[in-house]
Amino acid sequence: MFEAGLQRNGPWIAGIDFPFGQSREFVKNIGWPLSWADYVAHVGSLERSEFRDVLLNYKKLRAIGNKEHRRATDKLASSISPQKLYGVPVALMFFEGAPRLLGSGVTIPHMQKGDPLRIVVEAYPGILARSLINRRSYKSDTKRKQTDEKFEARRELFHRLKNDAITRYGFAVDAPEGICDDPGADHLDALLCAVQAAWAWSKRESGYGKPDNFDALEGHIADPHLL
């Protein structure tokens, strides 16, 4: 389904919530090619177990506190390392997602020149959510943790987004409040990703919101809070 979505005829822009790249430090240390397309193609040639072993073996050789590296954009966004295998396994999201982006022929601004009518940017709903409701928890996939408090946090997040979007992002947001009913917040997070993608599109004449410290080997999250 993901691949089919990437192949849909444009014009469109999508914000997708997984790390498109790895940190420059890791790529250099592990000896992968020093271009995004080349090292992602290499990752795509590995089995999942092989990729996992690469990350685990890399960590074995390094000191505590220097095992998993974050990209520049992760440090600004307070997001975790794309080498992370446990907890939120974003390393596996990268493993499954980045090679599919490479093979899809989409355009990733400043990283992959593909179909100009199909554009993909990296999104991260967490940074947008924190800017509106701080670090309040608003979602859970565990039944016993799906509380009224989290539901109210989703509603507050939704309403603050609608009220503040013009100021923060330069456009209005129109969506049904019913998306707050999903305790896992998949629909609400999708809205946040769409807002980040729309902001990137609004900045297309000035680099799609590319930050000054942009690294084409690593990629970056599209959000004005990271500029």
Image (tube, helix red, strand yellow):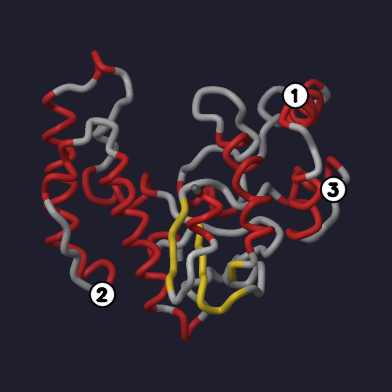
Sequence order check, earlier mark of 2 and 1: 1
Q: Nearer the viewer, residue 173 or 62?
A: 173
Instruction: Residue 164: name its quadrant.
Output: bottom left
What residue type is disc 1 on? Leu
**Labelled pair 1, 3 in contact (Cβ < 8 Å):** no
Q: Position of residue 55 (x, y in %)?
A: 74, 30
10 Å neighbourhood of mark 1: few (<14), some, or many (≥20)?
A: some
10 Å neighbourhood of mark 3: few (<14), some, or many (≥20)?
A: some
| Pointer 2 residue | 170
Residue drawn at x 48%, y 75% is 208
Residue drawn at x 37%, y 44% is 126
Residue 152 in the figure: left or right of residue 222: left
Instruction: Residue 60: name its quadrant.
Output: top right
**Labelled pair 2, 1 in contact (Cβ < 8 Å):** no
Q: Residue at the top extreme?
A: 144
Sequence order check, earlier mark of 2 and 3: 3
| Pointer 3 residue | 32
In this picture, is 91 found above or below 75? Answer: above
| Pointer 1 residue | 56
Q: Position of residue 9 (x, y in %)?
A: 48, 71
Tally the numbered discs. 3
**CA–CA distance between discs 1 and 3?**
16 Å
Residue 70 in the figure: left or right of residue 39: left
Q: Nearer the viewer, residue 49 or 164?
A: 49
Placement of the C terminus among the 4 image quadrants: bottom left
